[in-house]
């Protein structure tokens, strides 16, 4: 499969920073990878944030809007983990200040508290549009085309995760939960729609905040309610995008089936043994009558992992609203050799509206249903435990906290493009270890490398190709 790239008319070679120091050369390569990735895919920071309007009075503006938002992105891109670290590590640092001067015409990096004050007045919908437009740009420019399911569908995983937890009420929109010890916890979860790919990309496509309409709601908000809101917004924003949803068992049911039929979406939904008993019973009964719907496949190192697939098409299910749905069920029994010579077998099962055959069942399972875990690993786990500190309260203001959340999504997207892009891989063919190490190296390069103004200007005008491995 060919590499993915955006092709420009002419490709220039970026002149290296004059130095015999190998470490300096590596730092220059990292700064180039960062600035060129933003410029190449999104037209630079100013264009990236063009949908955001500045709510501040012009007479009281010290830092342009793009400088504030870029500082917020760097907070997460460098894994600083707290707003005050912007002041400690970026503000007042000579090389950092010089880069802000070259990029935005300001004398220094803004303070973290300056970001907090400004973000309280932002429009959350505009920040959502920044994130959504970034993923849309990658789709429109065909960067993500090689990763489509059956070379057609974009795999979108929708799942919820916790974001903020407080011991006291944080705002009127907090959800509440009482522990066994009688303590009331106030929390803010989110529901994410992420576009995931087999090579490990997990890009935020759209976010729905799960929150109550007021401090004393008759019923609390929840993932299912948020899912219907998110799905409606997703269809309105991308009316013709060929989507295959990958969902966990919480969403298995008539309302989801109906919604996907109405929106012309495909789906792969986890089906637990206790979920929708009628469908599970039909699968068990009909699979005995269709022994031909079976396929054995070996994968993994030395083909040691055995997968046994079984499927049943044309299961007619009538939901509680008396609407009929024609479905298929796919089951995979995966046996993995263990150190002691035994085998561990795991059952995976999905309900889908694809017509399943021996030609597509492996792809459906392994590149459709099984990729749902990427929202947990490459998505939520990375953002919580990989240095982005998703669960840290960067602001207690209800609006500013959401702005910081979206800037985290911007930074996470950029970090993935940098890490998997050819600019970084050419400069560091052996890598730098973990993604955290890459963030640390980026921070050190930003703080220590003094780049001539002409060098930075050249970085922003040079034409390049950035490719990703599609194997």
Image (tube, grey):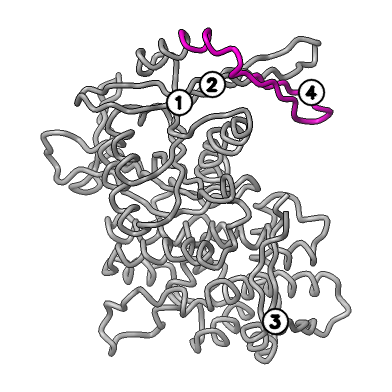
Q: CA distance from mark 2 to mark 3?
A: 61 Å
- The residues colored magenta run 285-308
Q: Are marks 4 and 3 in contact (CB under 8 Å)?
A: no
Report the disc number at residue 275: none
Q: Nearer the viewer, mark 2 or mark 3?
A: 2
SS category of the residue bearing label 2 = strand
Q: Are marks 2 and 4 in contact (CB under 8 Å)?
A: no
Q: CA distance from mark 2 to mark 4?
A: 23 Å
Relative to 198, is 140 on the left or the right?
A: left
Q: Are marks 2 and 1 in contact (CB under 8 Å)?
A: yes
**Is 208 colored magenta in this rendering?**
no
SS category of the residue bearing label 3 = loop
| Disc 2 target residue | 311
For marks 2 and 1, the one nearer the N-term is: 2
Q: Are marks 1 and 4 in contact (CB under 8 Å)?
A: no
| Disc 4 target residue | 304
- Please tell me whether residue 107 is drawn above or below residue 412 in the rendered image: below
Q: CA distance from mark 4 to mark 3?
A: 52 Å
Q: CA distance from mark 1 to mark 4?
A: 28 Å
| Disc 1 target residue | 328
For marks 2 and 4, the one nearer the N-term is: 4
SS category of the residue bearing label 4 = loop
Report the disc number at residue 450: 3
Residue at the (52%, 61%) spot, across then down: 139
């Amino acid at each position: 499969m060919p590499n993915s790239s955006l092709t420009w008319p002419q490709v220039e070679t970026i002149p290296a920073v004059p130095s015999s120091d190998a470490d300096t050369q590596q730092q220059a390569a990292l700064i180039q990878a960062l600035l060129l990735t933003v410029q190449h895919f999104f037209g630079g920071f100013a264009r990236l944030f063009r949908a955001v309007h500045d709510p501040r009075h012009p007479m009281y503006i010290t830092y342009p809007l793009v400088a504030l938002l870029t500082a917020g992105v760097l907070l997460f891109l460098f894994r600083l983990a707290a707003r005050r670290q912007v002041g400690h590590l970026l503000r007042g640092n000579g090389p950092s200040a010089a880069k802000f001067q070259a990029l935005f015409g300001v004398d220094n990096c803004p303070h973290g508290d300056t970001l907090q004050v400004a973000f309280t007045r932002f429009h959350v919908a505009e920040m959502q549009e920044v994130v959504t437009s970034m993923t849309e740009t990658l789709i429109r420019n065909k960067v993500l085309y090689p990763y489509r399911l059956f070379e057609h569908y974009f795999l979108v995983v929708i799942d919820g995760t916790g974001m903020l937890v407080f011991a006291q009420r944080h705002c009127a929109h907090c959800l509440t939960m009482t522990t066994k010890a009688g303590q009331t916890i106030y929390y803010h979860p989110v529901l994410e729609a992420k576009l995931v790919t087999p090579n490990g990309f997990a890009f935020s496509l759209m976010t729905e905040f799960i929150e109550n309409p007021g401090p004393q709601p008759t019923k609390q908000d929840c993932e299912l309610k948020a899912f219907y809101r998110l799905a409606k917004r997703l269809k309105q924003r991308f009316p013709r995008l060929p989507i295959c949803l990958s969902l966990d068992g919480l969403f298995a049911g008539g309302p989801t089936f109906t919604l996907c039929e109405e929106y012309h979406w495909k789906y792969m939904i986890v089906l637990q043994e206790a979920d929708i008993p009628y469908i599970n019973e039909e699968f068990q009964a009909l699979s005995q009558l269709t022994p031909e719907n079976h396929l054995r496949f070996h994968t993994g190192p030395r083909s040691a992992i055995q997968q046994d697939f079984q499927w049943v098409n044309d299961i007619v299910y009538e939901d509680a609203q008396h609407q009929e749905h024609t479905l298929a069920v796919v089951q995979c029994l995966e046996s993995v050799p263990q150190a002691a010579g035994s085998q561990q077998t795991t059952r995976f099962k999905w309900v889908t509206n694809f017509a399943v055959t021996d030609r597509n069942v492996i792809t459906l399972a392994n590149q459709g249903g099984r990729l749902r875990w990427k929202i947990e690993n490459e998505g939520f786990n990375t953002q919580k435990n990989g240095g982005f500190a998703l669960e840290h309260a960067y602001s207690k203001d209800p609006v500013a906290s959401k702005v910081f959340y979206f800037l985290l999504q911007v930074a996470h997207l950029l970090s993935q493009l940098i890490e998997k892009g050819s600019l970084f891989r050419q400069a560091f063919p052996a890598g730098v270890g973990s993604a955290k190490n890459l963030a640390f190296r980026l921070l050190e390069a930003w703080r220590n490398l003094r780049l001539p103004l002409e060098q930075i200007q050249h970085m922003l005008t040079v034409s390049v190709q950035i490719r990703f491995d599609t194997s």
